[in-house]
Amino acid sequence: MSETDAGKLSPKNRNDGNVGRRTFLKATGVSAGAAALAGCTDTIGGGGDGGIPDTIRLGALGPADSPMGDSILKSAELAVEEINDDGGIAGADVTLSTKDTKDDPGTTRSGYQELTTGENVHATVGIFGSENLLSIMGNISNAQTVHMTAGAATPEAPARVADDFEANKYWFRVGPVNADYLQQSMIDYASARFDTMGWDTVAVIAEDYVWTEPITDSIEQRLEEEVGVEVTSVQRIAEGTEDFTPIYDQLESAGVDGAFTALAHIGTTSLVQWAQQQRPFGYGGIHVPTQLPSFWDATSGACISTFSQTTATADSEITEKTVPYADAYAEKYDGALPVYTGYSAYDAVYMLKDAIESGESVDSDTIVSELESMTFTGTSGTLEFFGEDGDYPHDIKYGEEYTRGVYFQWQPEGESGTQSVVWPDEHQQSEYQAPPWQ
Amino acid sequence: MAGNTDTGVRTWGELLDPRSMATHQQLGLVAILALFVLPLVLPAIWAFRVAGALFFATFVMSWDFVSGYTGEISFGHGLFFGVGGYAAGMANLHLDVDPWLAVFVGVAAAGAAGLLIGFPSLRLQGPYFSLVTLVTPIILISVFRFFPDLTGGELGLVGVGTVDKFGDLLFLPSPGFSPIGAAYLALGVFLFALVVFVAVTRSDAGMVLTGIREDETAVAATGKNPAKFKLFAFVLSGLIGGLAGATYGFSAVGSFTVSELLALVISIEVIVAAILGGMGTITGAAFGGAFFYILRTVMRNIEFIGELYFLVFAVVTLLFLFFLPQGIVPAAVNRLFAGGSPGEPVTDGGSTDAMAVLRDWMDRLGGEKR
């Protein structure tokens, strides 16, 4: 992480207090006029264009120990490095400070406070984990610093923006699409592929976490009415469930063709037991662990023929930026490949770059208006946010013309396996294959 | 003056005169004065850290008061913080009780939890009692999961809506979102707990509690009822722990989540911090709590160490425990100032300075004779 050189320190220091001073003024109840005055100092920069300081400070948050968080932190780092190599943001150097959220609300909040109040960053990206995101919505509002979520899917966040737009307008989500749209995505996939997969009777299994609530609310009805398949059961599986045998026995006796999943935190045990027990039904849906590019090796191939929705796979050309990003990531991080959170975190940093450059300012309100009117081609698709009066204010739009991710299946390739895209048609790399024991 | 048994009774003025205090007491006084100034002069992020450290130090003192003094080691003290915090948060969220009043709901609930935990301690001792304290918060967490609409489940109360923040308090900015407000709220709670715990432990009751730790049978043989004192200790500890939990949750540094108030790791950290600072001393626990919190925060923010901070932190803690088993504060007082703690109860039937002054006042007021 590079800092500015000594010659640039003076104007930088004038801007150091941007966010902190504004927060402080708000906190101490100083009049709006004084706060506006403080806002003016935000735009005193070394660039001489009235809005860009010498150093633009960004922050990234994520659980460093999980692949989802690791991808956020590394992708933000990669984007910042590329931007600096390419002349920075409007000529300003960019620094990135990363915080490990430990996937815990308290640690997430203190990390966020360190970034906004301690280091006065101009914007933050990341998080992963809806629980953690919701725990800092109030802090985002108080810090009045733009936050670009990558990883958490809860629609509760845009609902808060809708409830009190002025207070919460600093929140945006770059990806994944929210859980309502994840349900839509499951319906879209089922409509397009269940027929050829031979899935006429299915059971839905979802983990009992906040992000799956919108999915299980009405998926049974929608699958039956819109897709025309029979749904034998919709089960919410408790955290800590170790033995899926009775659940699979039940599914088997119900004669299901497939287990349609919404699993992220507790997906691995479920998947491995399904493969070990060679159950006579297929398995897949939204399954976050199987999205990991290293999952084939990690499970010794147990993930064969499972499928999952994800933002992008390393070799799927969602846009012209997708593959170059995955390649650059692999090059920088010893061959490792990003997971879905990484694509969004990477796009988020570049969207901030565009917003700051077009608004010619790091002022939060300016960045907000720039992001609201932006159409951005990212690694994960064409990205556009809902406006204040949209269905999900400041959330990313879902659809064929925007972003909707892909469904891939683990298929054998030589000694190992590969993630092969099976939907949508324009990105399809192969047909769905039934498990080898069926 | 330390452990003084002279019969000359001094006035409050003399007792509180900093010039007559021992060196380490004077240092403590300076530290408290510094806590009033620090939030104003330090960068805002340090006001957050000071607030967090003071809330945690209050948690640690509440553990030390009951476990450090009676020797009944509680492995689930987070129960009190959780009950106090969640009761206050839920009162505010579901019943629309003003946060300042909701704090009292939390305090009362935590006091009741103190009674519930205190009763087993009358019958169970040692590891059996510790097991009860260990299991109780786990049961509560499980209960919380069954009623997510009320408790927010795993997510805590932030999940069911935004808990109202404190309104402005006097001239201070709202502790609900201001770092400075949060720091002064934490300081107020901390000082209140410090005064209460120090006053009680330096009284005859403190002597009885220490006696229970050393030999409960001997205490009973003197005609005192150890059960009564232990129950009192648990209830008082619960009340103050609940106060800290409730105010912490409403403040800008905290919220009402399982991982911040109830989780087992909190209960363990509290024990480690109390042992680090000096078990059974209150002031040691206060110092240990603040020291532990700041050390952890600073380490987490050091580049490179940040990723390994928990490992480094655990090793540093172990080194402290190994080389300073009696705790930092008692070691510093004994080695640097070569004197006992002046406020400690004495074993020869004498009385502490504070008690002597108090008795003198009671005599003057018309004489409640003991």
Image (cartoon, coloured by chain):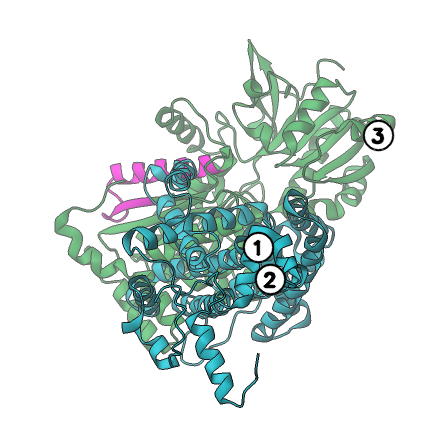
Chain of the residue on which disc 2 is drawn = B
Q: Name the residue furthest top.
A: A414
**Residue span colored magenta:** A69-96
Q: Please, what secondary structure does the residue beneath circle 3 have?
A: helix
Task: Classify residue A295 by image quadrant.
Answer: top right
Placement of the N terminus of chain A among the 4 image quadrants: top left
Q: Which residue is mark 2?
A: B233
Indicate the position of residue A31 as horizontal and vertical percent values: 36, 78
- Are the residues under badges 2 and 1 in a single subunit? yes
Q: Give the CA separation, mark 2 to mark 3.
A: 53 Å
Percent x, y of residue B99? 57, 72
Vertical placement of residue B339 versus B100, above or below:
above
| Crowd rating for badge 1 (residues with CA inside 10 Å; few <14, some 14–19, many 20+) | many
Q: Which residue is mark 3?
A: A250
Disc 1 target residue: B70
In the visual, does B287 lie left or right of B245?
A: left
Which color has been applied to chain A in this rendered view? Answer: green
Left or right of residue A438: residue B32: left
Residue A38 visible in rendering: yes
